[in-house]
Image: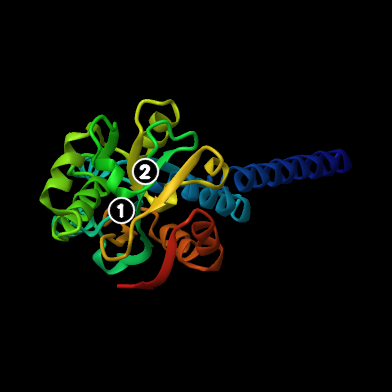
Amino acid sequence: MKQISYIACTCALLLIAGLLVAGCTDSVASSGTPGTTLTVFAAASLTGAFTDIGNTYEKQHPELKVDLAFDGTQALRTQIEQGASPDVFVSANTKHMNALKDAGFMDNETVVFFLENGMAVIVPADNPAGITSLSDLARPGVKLLIGTKDVPFGSYTRQVLDKMAADPGYGEAYRTAVMDNVISEETAVSTVVPKLMLGEADAAFVYKSDVKPEDKDKIHRIEIPAEYNVVAQYPLGILAESSQKSAAEAFIRFVTGPDGSAILTEYGFDPVPATS
């Protein structure tokens, strides 16, 4: 009887030990940290470049997902002011970034300039209106697309026209005639190229980076001379309320580092050393 009791006791202990081991194993398996999602609000002009940057970064960091949202910078700013909570904000100008900094939405110490861009005029490859120079934009009947005055590329367009109006070679009459030819003011630069390619307009003011490599056989770019052009500076930074600041800092280092800069250059941007 004693031997039977000993065996029974031993079996019971082994069974309990097995259950404890199984319980510990299940506990370890279920305690893995779920994948981090990093939410990035970026200006519409960055759609192609940042889509590639996000995909490249995810491949290098499979534990992390980069959730990208693109829109006009002013629209993204409004969303943040109304309660949206991205981790990173990338602006196409300083105005909207500074407004968020001043209102306490940004972790101001993380905001840096990392990119420059310039303006250009684009026309369809078949160029039905025969536009070959900036002077042609003032011809009666030309259909022109620009941005609204509140969206960065629309503000920059007006600055270009102001500079040209100050030159006697163009003058105030030129600016007036060009603005009279505007058939639509867009709230995001991403809507301009599709409309142009569909034949809804003859020309458009856009960022020079908006002519993608795959579009070069469909769109012709007319350069704006440096004395009239405007250099757009792009800042980016981390939101003050972000709960993923370490991940956001690592992502920004990638964007401003060699890999991110190479992608941005491929899309026609001019990366600059990050400065506060």
Q: Circle 2 sits on which residue?
A: 44
Residue 167 in picture, x, y percent from top left: 17, 61
Task: Determine crowd level at label 2: few under 14, some 14-19, many 20+ residues with C-alpha closer than 10 A.
Answer: many
Residue 52 in picture, x, y percent from top left: 54, 48
Image quarter of the N terminus: top right
What's the amino acid at mark 2? Ala
Residue 73 appears in the figure: no
Residue 68 appears in the figure: yes
Give whichever of discs 2 and 1 has the lower sequence position: 2
Q: Circle 1 sits on which residue?
A: 92
Number of marks present in the image shown: 2
- Check disc 1 and report its element: helix, strand or loop: loop
Q: Is the residue under label 1 in contact with that under label 2 (CB below 8 Å)? A: yes
What's the amino acid at mark 1? Ala
Q: Which residue is depicted at the point 34% across and 56% down?
A: 224
Measured Cα–Cα span from mark 2 to mark 1: 8 Å
Residue 217 in picture, x, y percent from top left: 56, 40
Q: Foreground residue, 244 or 196?
A: 196
- Check disc 2 and report its element: helix, strand or loop: helix
Q: Is the residue 191 above or below the residue 58 in the image?
A: above
Q: Which residue is depicted at the point 40% across and 50% down?
A: 222
Task: Determine crowd level at label 1: few under 14, some 14-19, many 20+ residues with C-alpha closer than 10 A.
Answer: many
Q: Is the residue 98 above or below the residue 173 in the image?
A: below
Q: Foreground residue, 13 or 47?
A: 47
